[in-house]
Image (cartoon, rainbow, N blue to C red):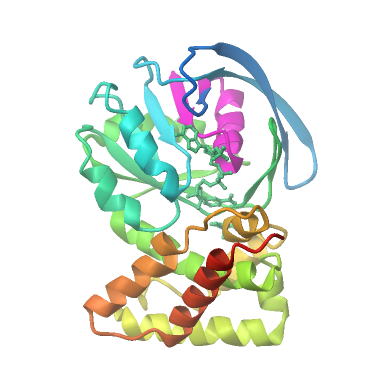
Amino acid sequence: MRIEIIGAGAVGLLVASYFAEKNMDVYIVGKPTGETVCEDIQIERTNVNQSVTSVNVKYISALSNKANLIIVAVKYGQLHEVYASMEHVKDSIPLLFLQNGLAHYEEALALSKAHIAFCSIQFGALKLSEHHVAHKGEGVMKIAVAKGANDEFSFLNGLSSAGLPIVFEQDAEKMLMEKALLNCFINPLTAILQVKNGQLITQSHTLQLLKDLYNELMTAFPQFKETFHFNQVIALCEKTAENTSSMLADRLANRKTEIDTIAGAILKKAEQNEKKLPVLQTLYYLVKAFEESGEQM
Ligand SMILES: NC(=O)C1=CN([C@@H]2O[C@H](COP(=O)(O)OP(=O)(O)OC[C@H]3O[C@@H](n4cnc5c(N)ncnc54)[C@H](OP(=O)(O)O)[C@@H]3O)[C@@H](O)[C@H]2O)C=CC1
Ligand SMILES: CC(C)(CO)C(=O)C(=O)O
């Protein structure tokens, strides 16, 4: 099976290394350069238990039109360039989007492609150097098909492993909403306070903020009360305790964060239901404020 992964970032490299280990023909697609180069690269993965694994993948500068699956592993803000680069790609090639947040859901479904699935990643990844990635927390990769045939994605079941467990979900929108809610707890606070995920539950004042945020969100979205429990927030902080959240990683690298597709999208949904989220709104403004200040870390 040929899998092409757009984006040689933290998650792209990590997923590439696990799938190559399962003998998939993995190609990482870099930023468009105009040349069609194809070279072997070795990805080094440092696992949660600090063991290091090396696997070979290929690196290409453009999508080939021969893939059995294309995985989109760029940040939300980088998707528009990717949509454009996929215009020549056959509509029958399945696409898997693995962004956090909600804003990409409608956009991706509006593409002419026949088979589209989304992913909710419950672990952490940190890119250490060009070809070295660290797996920073244990957790599953949830996948839900939102358009087209489930069969096109079912081979991914066979790629599930102890290091990267894959679980299929029924409802993609609900899955993304639940992950966006989880990210609303972890990402803005870790980025503002510049702490690792685990510290949010070991400090009493941040734990109190998490509880206030939970009560506020469950009042605004009572339909999630049954399935979305506070202990899931605690469990994600514990499982990814040593991770630098993707939003903190963006702040430290002076990159634009994904606050709009995460907290911004949830605030919009609450507004549509005439609900106010003062705690989340404040965190949103704080993240926007440090983005605007363009501070150098
Ligand atoms: N890191 C984590 O722990 C987790 C991340 N996620 C989600 O996964 C997604 C990816 O995050 P992450 O891997 O951390 O992000 P990264 O910034 O590490 O990776 C994105 C990569 O895509 C590259 N890229 C951008 N545009 C293009 C393009 N047009 N063609 C090819 N490559 C391109 C970027 O290059 P350049 O840097 O040069 O722009 C970068 O290498 C995000 O939505 C994030 O929220 C979800 C759970 C955990
Ligand atoms: C799972 C978690 C919270 C890992 O840090 C994440 O999604 C992120 O950092 O964006």
- Quadrant (top left/top right/bottom left/bottom right) for the C terminus: bottom right
Percent x, y for residue 45?
A: 71, 35
Instruction: Confirm whether residue 232 shows in the render.
Output: no
Which sits in the foreground, 163 or 115? 115
Q: Is residue 131 left or right of residue 141?
A: right
Q: Which range is magenta?
A: 1-27
Up/down of 9 relative to 44, above or below: below
Q: Identify the residue shown where x is 52% and y is 55%.
A: 256
Q: Identify the residue shown where x is 51% and y is 34%.
A: 7
Q: Is residue 12 left or right of residue 109?
A: right
Q: Identify the residue shown where x is 48% and y is 41%.
A: 74
Up/down of 38 relative to 289, above or below: above
Percent x, y for residue 94?
A: 31, 30
Would you say residue 12 sits in the magenta stretch? yes
Up/down of 133 relative to 220, above or below: above
Which sits in the foreground, 276 or 227? 276
Which sits in the foreground, 235 or 2? 2
Up/down of 59 relative to 121, above or below: above
Q: Is residue 212 left or right of residue 48?
A: left
- Quadrant (top left/top right/bottom left/bottom right) for the N terminus: top left
Instruction: Confirm whether residue 105 shows in the render.
Output: yes
Q: Quadrant of residue 254?
A: bottom right
Q: Is residue 101 left or right of residue 133?
A: left
Would you say residue 115 sits in the magenta stretch? no
Q: How many marks?
A: 0
Percent x, y for residue 163?
A: 63, 41
Q: Quadrant of residue 89?
A: top left
Percent x, y for residue 6?
A: 47, 31
Q: Identify the residue shown where x is 67% and y is 73%.
A: 193
